[in-house]
Image (tube, grey):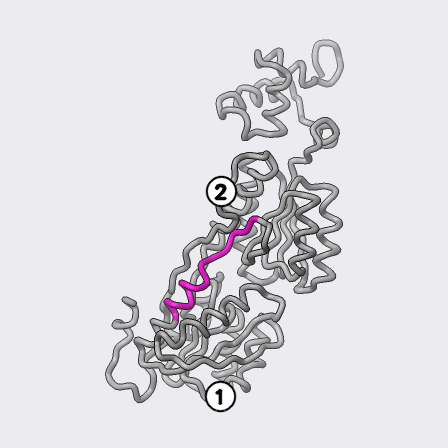
């Protein structure tokens, strides 16, 4: 309460801070539009008076909620852990709250989650969306939108460099003497799955590598375990899995079949999720900058919300890096080539 016995208002804060009421409003609703010194000055005055910005009233006044929605295809998949943290940290820094929704690898479920989020958020980030391009463009017409791990014409996107990642994996396997590689595929609705398979088909001949494809029931450890039989029918010496969870499941299936890794089969995953080095053998993988993807996604969304200048190109591509561990090795019978020769490719 102030001296008049009523709750403090934005005007009380403005008088104490020596600024205009509009400056106080921006400091709370659009913190990126005031200097850090000014924001600290306003916050100190608000703290002294016991003023707390009312989110509902602010939303009525400005049309903003200072809240964004993040929808992920499967919240239990560790690939999203870094992305979630990256979005949340950046959002908090800008004075936004993040609401998280899990699509559970279901397009209908994802549509419902997005519909429920839209009325209460200023913008949306879709991570590994399973919705159609048309449905995603419909969302973009209602709220500012950024798409992760997928490119949708007409929308802003943040992706990792799939082609460079596949190239590094193939160069590594080629250097170890492998002459063919089998791809353990992910969900049919996954944009990233299509890109990885296409990159394998395009780049395989460059390294003299023949390619084959095996489907999986789900992009999970159990999916990789179940796919081990189909992989073994092709008798490959090397496998690249759609993601690390499939790769880890495949390692378990091969162990149950008494197939030695990497002596008989080399396995490469994708994403470098938390735990990819906990399995035996530790999984070689193409690492994606997951937290950076989340961070860049929020700031791109923030620019859209504030109608700030955008990057010229609508797709931001972040670099990948091959992390070599124990699940890849020299192909049996390929001579005396050593792994070290491949690590430098």
- Residue 322 figure quarter: bottom left
Q: Is residue 338 left or right of residue 139?
A: left
Residue 177 colored in magenta in the image = no
Q: Does residue 261 appear in this view?
A: no
Quadrant of image for the N terminus: top right
- Residue 28 figure quarter: top right
User: What x and y, as percent, mark residue 345?
Assistant: 29, 67
Could you tell which of marks 2 and 1 lies nearer the N-terminus? 1
User: What x and y, as percent, mark residue 343?
Assistant: 30, 68
Which of 230 and 44 lies nearest the eye of the viewer?
230
> According to the image, label 1 marks what residue?
234
Which residue is depicted at the point 61% across and 71% down? 188
Q: CA distance from mark 2 to mark 1?
A: 45 Å
Q: Is residue 200 left or right of residue 302?
A: left
Q: Does residue 35 appear in this view?
A: yes
Which residue is depicted at the point 53% across and 73% down? 246
Disc 1 crowd, CA 10 A, few/some/many (<14, 14-19, 20+): few
Which residue is depicted at the point 40% across and 82% down? 180
Which residue is depicted at the point 57% across and 29% down? 31
- Residue 163 figure quarter: bottom left
Residue 158 colored in magenta in the image = yes
Decide: is 187 above or below 98: below
> According to the image, label 2 marks what residue?
311
Disc 2 crowd, CA 10 A, few/some/many (<14, 14-19, 20+): few
Is disc 1 placed on a helix, strand or loop? loop
**Which residues, given as a range, are shown in magenta?**
156-169
- Residue 8 is tagged as none
User: What x and y, as percent, mark residue 310?
Assistant: 52, 40
Is disc 2 placed on a helix, strand or loop? loop
Mark 2 or mark 1: which is in front? 2
Decide: is 325 above or below 300: below
């Amino acid at each position: 309460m102030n001296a008049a016995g009523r709750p403090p208002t934005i005007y009380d804060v403005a008088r104490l801070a020596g600024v205009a009421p509009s400056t106080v409003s921006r400091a709370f609703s659009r913190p990126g539009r005031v200097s850090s010194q000014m924001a600290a000055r306003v916050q100190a005055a608000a703290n002294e008076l016991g003023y707390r910005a009312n989110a509902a009233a602010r939303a009525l006044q400005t049309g903003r909620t200072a809240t964004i929605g993040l929808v992920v295809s499967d919240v239990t998949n560790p690939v999203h852990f870094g992305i979630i943290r990256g979005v949340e940290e950046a959002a908090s820094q800008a004075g936004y709250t993040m609401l998280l929704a899990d699509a559970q690898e279901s397009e209908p479920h994802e549509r419902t989650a997005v519909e429920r989020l839209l009325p209460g958020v200023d913008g949306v980030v879709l991570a590994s969306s399973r919705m159609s391009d048309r449905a995603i463009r419909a969302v973009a017409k209602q709220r500012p939108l950024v798409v992760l791990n997928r490119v949708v014409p007409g929308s802003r996107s943040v992706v990792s460099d799939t082609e460079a990642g596949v190239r590094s994996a193939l160069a590594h396997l080629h250097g170890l003497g492998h002459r063919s590689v089998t791809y353990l595929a992910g969900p049919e609705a996954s944009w990233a799955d299509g890109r990885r398979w296409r990159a394998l088909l395009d780049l395989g001949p460059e390294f003299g590598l023949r390619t084959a494809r095996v489907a999986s029931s789900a992009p999970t450890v159990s999916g990789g375990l179940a796919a081990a039989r189909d992989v073994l029918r092709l008798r490959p010496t090397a496998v690249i899995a759609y993601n690390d969870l499939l790769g880890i499941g495949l390692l378990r299936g091969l162990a149950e079949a008494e197939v030695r890794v990497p002596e008989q089969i080399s396995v490469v995953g994708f994403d470098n999720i938390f735990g990819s080095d906990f399995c035996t053998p530790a999984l070689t993988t193409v690492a994606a900058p997951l937290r950076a993807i989340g961070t860049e996604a929020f700031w791109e969304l923030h620019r859209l919300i504030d109608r700030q200048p955008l990057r010229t190109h609508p797709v931001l591509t972040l670099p990948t890096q091959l992390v070599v561990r124990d699940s890849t090795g020299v192909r049996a019978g390929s001579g005396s080539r050593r792994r070290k020769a491949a690590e430098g490719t």
